[in-house]
Image (cartoon, grey):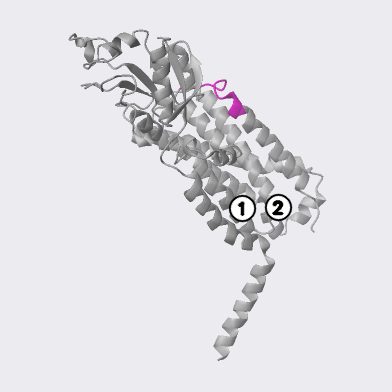
Amino acid sequence: MRSISRILAVFSKELAQLRRDRMTFGMVVMIPLIQLILFGYAINTNVRDIPIAVVDQSQTGISRILVQMVEATRVVTVTERLTTPQEAEEAIRSARVRAAFILPDDLTQRLARSPAVGLGTPPSTDQETSRPVAQWIVDGSDTMIASSIKSLRNMPLSEIYRQAPNRSTPTFEVTLFYNPEQRTAVNIVPGLVGTILTMTMIMFTSAAIVRERERGNMEMLINTPIRPIELMIGKIIPYIFIGLVQTAIILSLGHILFNVPLDGNMIDLFVGTLLFIGASLSLGLVFSTIAQTQLQAMQMTVFVLLPSILLSGFMFPYEGMPVVAQYIAEALPATHFMRMIRGFVLRDATLMDVHRDVIWMSGFFVLGMIAAAVRFKKRLD
């Protein structure tokens, strides 16, 4: 009986402590709730509304009908209309679109040569009957996006023909850029850099101020002339080098073991990675000024890590998420870095190509450092 009473006493003590620790109690409720919402609502492997560009070199009524038919599938949505395939390739490289639909200037002739009675023209018997009527060029670095576009390869053209053609070749030719073999490692390894940096950088600095308080070092910091912003900068500098080392390890081993290409400019990659490390570290410092214990700091890290993995485009395509989930994803540094590093490593993109992400990341870093410095008070209470 005494043993049971002692156990009950400890149980009562832990329950009272948990009730006073509102942060932990909130995480107990919020973490499973967020996972349920993310997996049930935001995560969708059936990708829809992929942004594409249209290059209509035919400029006919038939070409406009064909574009409308493609959009009616809801797999893609036209966000840009360009004049040349070269402009389309540049739009894909800069991540403005994920694919381009190119309609050749001889589109009507290709349709008329189809082996069925269509467009009021008798079928031809020449070798060009096997030519696809149009072409897709696709950013193949994301295998889910590529697979969704490839599902349109044999799209029927029954709305154009009075009789469905019996084609021996696909309706559309699909050309995959950057990852023609559709190897998963090509997509995963660059994204893994963002995931690991998010986890480690926020985790390291989220406990920085709390650790000083728990170790009794806060009294010494209070008595020094150091200003809050100087303390914050000094805290993050060692972790910047750690983040750069982690990036070098992942990319170099990914290139050696999985043959992941490293086609981009290393200076652009360095600058983009530095911005992301700074943004993640500043977010961790803000958490450190809020948390009262290292356990709370770890809980905050997990609270950000889960959405960063699921919404940033690392595991599931950004385009497949609902609009609300995309807005949440845009607030996360990992989302912007995923676009940046995949552009640098796989598509030979430059800082100018991803300038919006660069500006957002720079602003996040500056505001995060200012918020952490303002919240940090050189006092013990």
**Total of numbered circles in the picture?**
2
Location of the N terminus (image quadrant) = bottom right
Frontmost residue, 54 versus 249: 54
Residue 147: x percent and y percent?
35, 32
- Residue located at (52% from left, 42% from top): 311
First in residue order: circle 1 vs circle 2: 2
Is residue 83 placed above or below 169 in the rendered structure? above
Residue 47: x percent and y percent?
43, 36
As drawn, is 272 to the left or to the right of 124? right
Q: Which residue is mark 1?
A: 300
Amino acid type at mark 1: Met
Q: Residues within 10 Å of mark 2 (few under 14, many from 20)?
A: some
Q: Main secondary structure of the magenta part?
A: loop
Q: Are marks 1 and 2 in contact (CB under 8 Å)?
A: yes
- Residue located at (75% from left, 43% from top): 373
As drawn, is 348 to the left or to the right of 150? right
Q: Which residues are magenta?
A: 348-358
Q: Which residue is mark 2?
A: 290
Location of the C terminus (image quadrant) = bottom right
Residue 231 visible in image:
no
Judge whether residue 357 is colored magenta: yes
Residue 5: x percent and y percent?
59, 87
Per the image, label 2 sits on a secondary structure element best described as helix
